[in-house]
Image (cartoon, rainbow, N blue to C red):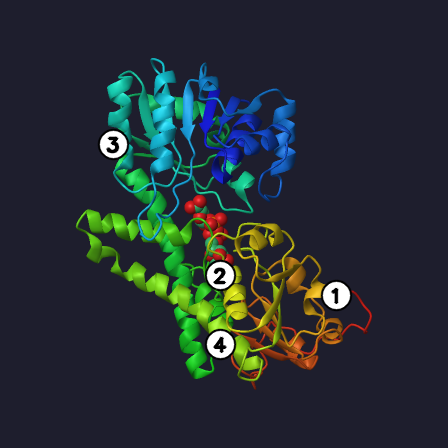
Amino acid sequence: MRLSVIGCGYLGAVHAACMAKLGHDVVGVDVDASKVARLNAGEAPFFEPGLPELLRESLGSGRLRFSTEMADVAGSAVHFIAVGTPQKRNENGADLSHVYAGVDALLPYLREGDLVVGKSTVPVGTARDLAARIAERCPSADLAWNPEFLREGFAVKDTLEPDRLVYGLADPASGVHLMLDEIYAQALADGRPRLIMDYETAELVKVSANAFLATKISFINAMAEVCEATGADVSVLADAIGHDARIGRKFLNAGLGFGGGCLPKDIRAFMARAGELGADQALTFLREVDSINMRRRARMVDLTREVCGGSLLGQRVAVLGLAFKPNSDDVRDSPALSVAAQLQLQGASVTATDPEAVPNASRRFPDLTYTTSIEDAVTHADAVIVLTEWEQYRTLDPAVLGSLVARPAIVDGRNCLEPERWRDAGWTYRALGRPRAASAVPVAGRSVGLPQAAAGATLSR
Ligand code: UGA
């Protein structure tokens, strides 16, 4: 099928490349000329494993191109709206200006029988409003709401192999679903569930899924607060409750909490929309979810101050990790960058590193010292803090790191290190939701007292 994708950010660029991979003829349209030039050159404008290869393959096949001209959508029968819906400045609600601008720019090019497909995350009620706008201008065109559930870091896989396909339709009998079925024929042939519903339910599926994930993370982080007050270990607790299939272990990793371009702004926009609809009471718990999440950042700063002997003034702190999660260079609402900035503002001298996010972090917060080398970051540090659980940090060798730092003190903001390994190598190890000192009871299934690598070995195991 001939498809257009309007908006070539995270969602749109991945969607366009994946649709071309599936055999469709795709044009991606974006107002940002430099982004379009990079995409046409086969470069992903952000770090996403597998995307550059997929872009080059799809561009090479002749089935994918990017343009700044909306007129280039002519000839496409289906137009995906994949623009961003960031949080409004100083307000909880979502900024829908890009959605309306994208649809308005598309309207003059819509032809009889065309289908507009919304993929952006929007407040409930937006699709119905957009459908009316489209109907006014081009009565024979239709609108479907088809939310996207991809995760950064797994965006290509999630798009090609979605857990489910959601079609929000004005009229399930209209036959619109058949066009979507043709687009997603591969996923449907693979047995992926496809659910047909009205616009409002489809919009709510997306925001309620993100609200649930955020709630699950804040739940375990609330347990971490209780563990801190009692000397219990939240990682062991999460493993134990996670064995109950009704609870599940996924998204129960306690630590610095959630960030990124989706979960934080989506729960806030959801609360704001519920307020407009007179259903604000239903979502007041999300305010607590947000508060628990933000408290973890403050707690991380406190723990760092504690291992620095009570004051951050003049202390050299090595920050490992800046991205909001591993396998991403995204620092939007990143808990890691927020903690690094707080430490610096409270008098510490921060040297921060990340495998991918240094350029984005240094643009957003230029006052920190940045390096791409773990060794440079930790040398002469009074405290090392792990804020994003990249694989290269999980496997760091405490003996080798110990020979570089001024004081062997580490704070694990993502519960991604083995406390015993670090303590056995002479480090002060602190973490969110874990006991201050080694438990008297050896933890079954954990390696205790692993042999240490000789000095001079590589930084990682
Ligand atoms: C999230 C959802 O997971 C996707 O399904 C959704 O499509 C996407 O938002 C979106 O709305 O576009 P993403 O923002 O890529 O995806 O990141 P997640 O993997 O959900 O992680 C979000 C944050 O939660 C990260 O900061 C991560 O470190 C944190 N997290 C995750 C935890 O603190 N603990 C966990 O157990 C899991």
Q: Quadrant of the C terminus?
A: bottom right
Where is residue 188? Give x, y as percent.
Answer: 46, 31
Q: CA distance from mark 1 to mark 2?
A: 25 Å
Asked if the residue under mark 1 is in contact with the one under mark 4, i.e. CB atoms within 8 Å, the reply is: no
Q: Nearer the viewer, mark 4 or mark 3?
A: 4
Say what amino acid the circle numbered 3 marks. Answer: Asp
Is the residue 207 above or below the residue 53 in the image? below
Identify the mark nearer the N-term, 2 or 3.
Answer: 3
Q: Amino acid at mark 4?
A: Asp
- Report the disc number at residue 247: none
The image quarter containing residue 396 is bottom right
Q: Is residue 378 left or right of residue 35?
A: right
Element carrying mark 1: loop
Q: Is mark 2 within 8 Å of ligand 1?
A: yes
**Residue 113 at x, y percent in the picture:** 34, 15
At 27% across and 51% down in the image, what residue appears?
272
- Disc on res. 129: 3
Q: Which mark is residue 302?
A: 4
The circle on residue 335 is 2
Q: Secondary structure at mark 4?
A: helix
- Give residue 156's position: percent from left, percent from top: 55, 39
**Mark 4 and mark 3 residues within 8 Å of each other at the beta carbon:** no
Whichever of callouts 4 and 1 sits on the residue coming sooner in the sequence is 4
Q: Which residue, given by chain and number where applicable, does mark 1 sit on?
A: 459
Q: Is there any visible trace of residue 172 in the rendered image? A: no
